[in-house]
Amino acid sequence: MQKLKQKVADIIEHAEPNLSLIGLFGTLGYPVYYLIWTYLYPQPYENLGFRIFCACLSMPWLLYRELPKRLKELFPVYFFLSLFIVMPYFFSFMMLKNEWSLVWAMSFMAGTFLLTLIIFDWVIILTMTGAGFMAAFATVFLLDGSVSFAYFVPEYIPIFLFSIAGGIIANHKRQLAHQSRISLMRSLSGSIAHEMRNPLSSITNAISTVQSIIPDKPASSREKEKFDLSYSGLINIHEVIDESLLTIKRGNKIIDSLLATLQDGVMDINNFRKLSAKQIIQTAVATYGYNDINDRTFIVENTDETFDFLGDKDLFIYVLFNLIKNALHYKSRPDFRIEIATKRDSLYNRIRVRDNGPGISPGKREIIFERFYTFGKSGGNGLGLSFCRRVIESFGGSIVCNSEEGHWTEFVISLPAYASKPARDLKKEILKQKKILIVDDQISNRLLLARYASEWDCPSDLAENGAQALEMISKTRYDLILMDFEMPSLDGDHAVARLRAALNIEPSLAPHYMQVPVVGITALPPCDALPRAARCGMNEVISKPVKKRDINRLFEQHFFSETSSATTDRNTILMGSRILLVDDNETSRKFMSMIMQRYGCAIGQAENGKVALDLLEKEDYDLILMDMEMPVMNGVETAMAIRKGDCFRRFGNFRSVPIIALTGNTGKESIEQVKKAGMNQHLGKPVFRDDLVAAATMWIKNTANAEENGHPAHIDAPSLSENFREAVEREKILDHSIISSLKEIGGDELLVSLIGAYRSDSEKIVEELDRALETGDIRQFDQLMHTLKGSSGSIGANRLFVLSRHLNEFSHRGEWPEAADWQSVLKNTFGITIDAMDAMLKTLRR
């Protein structure tokens, strides 16, 4: 009975959108066709009373949406009774009374086809059609004493069958598609609700923790009193909030991945990092949202034989959550336990999640990984294990189920070893989606670094000085920047200082470039290079000539490590800054105030644009955070009024004060509105702390450093060894690894061309060094020595590079080299280098 009620409800739901139209057709159609078949195309038999009766039966369909609730509850019974009369019974009766005439045979076929469109269930269609025909046959026989088949022809039978079967098949496929969409939506909503349960539970616990730390809510009579909070309490609150934000972001990532899975989208691999199996298992077991605190005791970890793998931390934790949840369903069994163990191997490592539940039959151990298939429990949506398999396969691994019915079930996750070829291939796939910028005034250096990057399939762009690099950066998003220090037009550290200040950077790219890793490449000694790198905002420095292993390490550190590469000291930049919050939502203002006050900012608040304009006239602010939707005066109107400046007498910074729009609508039109109003950037709501602080830091720093000029200060380099001649002679003349790399890039032809250009340019440099020495022009000497150092390092002239680097240390300090014979050593080393290159070229020509 319950199944029958559900079937009836499904049929009514299916027919409901068209009920009014069908009712209108029946109410008008039956009497209208009486006129047609009586006067226009007369038929042997017509019955006006019967038609009016059928029209009256159709009227409730027409008025279905206006029926009282009580009548709607009875409507399903009426619907089937009335449908039986007005469709199969009526058309069968009229066809039999007209002795199977052609008109009524066609009408019967049309009525049957219409019935298949209203009702999708083929059993009910065939039952109603057969019952209607038999009831009509009995009625005609009782009325007339016989049933005539005067115009019947046998060809009607296959035509009727084809019409009924075709209608049933077409409608059945349409209903299956409809049911699939409904099932998908139910599964999706159930899965999202499930994935939100853990984050919301964690946040609830976090709020409870904060409430236990802070003082009790005071009465209104104590409004002016101050309440103390200990240092440890404050630290705990911030840690709870930080963890809650991470939980929310993790939940959002899982939901996004689930949606991509349901749409057969590709798993996002950009966040894959080097992970420790032991650490991630411990994290999953510790943070799982247990329904009962005692459930944790069921889990046993055996992770002594740990390993590293490449994957997404949040997605893998979700996989472990899902396996734990499935296993805990059987926790009521005697001596229940879950064991999570790791096993290390040379190529593939394994994680086993085993429970002593009821087991799974052999025929179902593979089916359970299919979407929407559930086994062994009610209330599931069949997405969990399917999603788990997609996650593990995106890591380059696999997941299988082993089981013994009645005893145990085991899920085995196989993951490629971190140093294996599958993991390397996956890294290449990730690096294909990255892009690096190589900035160096030496073409051979640029080509060599590009070659190293291309071995990882990582795209790269090349720039020959800082000015060109900044122009490219302003238009393109780069994930890593390799920046030479000493270059013409604009040197590297000055370019990075402008980059970190977001000068002339597209606003949508500016937050990215506050955090992007920038690595200095230089032949300068560390005592010179490191202070300059620290002052301009570089992440680190590597020495020239750059080796392949250096690039491999950089990729590993900045693309596959979980460590942050942020370099900006936000506390220093934001300390003492004045920020105006303009938002009609008091809760939003309180939230942003708490965040920015933590960094030492002074906060002003306005509930609409008009109040904001009044505050700007009274006090100066370094930054404005502007909500878009507000009463009285919205964000766009306020921003336009600020930029116009007509409403101000005192406030003179209206053209340059940074304005960040806060909007829940991040569509293209909304962003265009923000730009036209003169706002500098937009942040989507809800605003997360890191995004808010990063944007505020960027624009306040940008304003403060807009006119920054000059180079970072140098510090003294240590003196060179007095026996530097012997030290230089111990160096190899040529670095064949660099030469081989250049040959791989462009073959012998490029190598010959580069060596020829190097020889010609270096001969001129040596001659000009003599003139600089004669005239005592130490600045010219410094520039020449830097050029010789850079070109020698990039072409593989190792000994001359080492010597030039030593001599350049003195010229950087404005001093001439200490050793009296430095000039002869330089010329001798240059000659030996050229001879070695000539010998190498002769070998190539053979």
Image (spheres, helix red, strand yellow):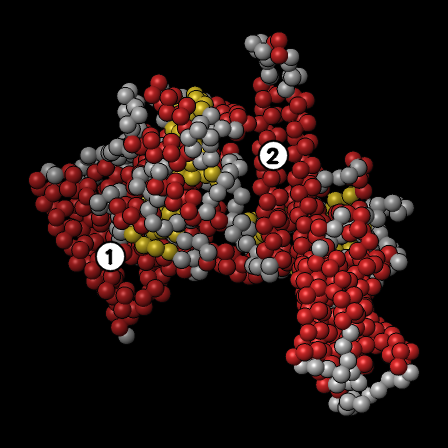
Q: Give the Cα separation between the discs numbered 2 and 1.
A: 59 Å
* Rendered residue at 44%/35% (across/down): 628
Where's residue 54, x and y in %? 77, 66
Check disc 2: other Cα within 10 Å, few if <14, some if 14-19, many if 20+.
some
Whether residue 256 is visible: yes
Q: Is residue 230 left or right of residue 371?
A: left
Check disc 1: other Cα within 10 Å, few if <14, some if 14-19, many if 20+.
many
Q: Is residue 124 left or right of residue 190?
A: right
Q: Is residue 277 left or right of residue 119?
A: left
Residue identifier under label 2? 243
Q: Nearer the viewer, residue 801 or 557?
A: 557
Residue identifier under label 1? 833
Quadrant of res 200 = top right
Single out the residue that lies furthest toward the front: 39
Quadrant of res 35 = bottom right
Q: Amino acid at mark 1?
A: Thr
Q: Is residue 39 above or below residue 558?
A: below
* Rendered residue at 39%/49% (across/down): 477
* Rendered residue at 43%/57% (across/down): 458
Where's residue 794, x and y in %? 29, 54
Query: Element under label 2?
Result: helix
Where's residue 440, x and y in %? 29, 50
Q: Amino acid at mark 2?
A: Glu
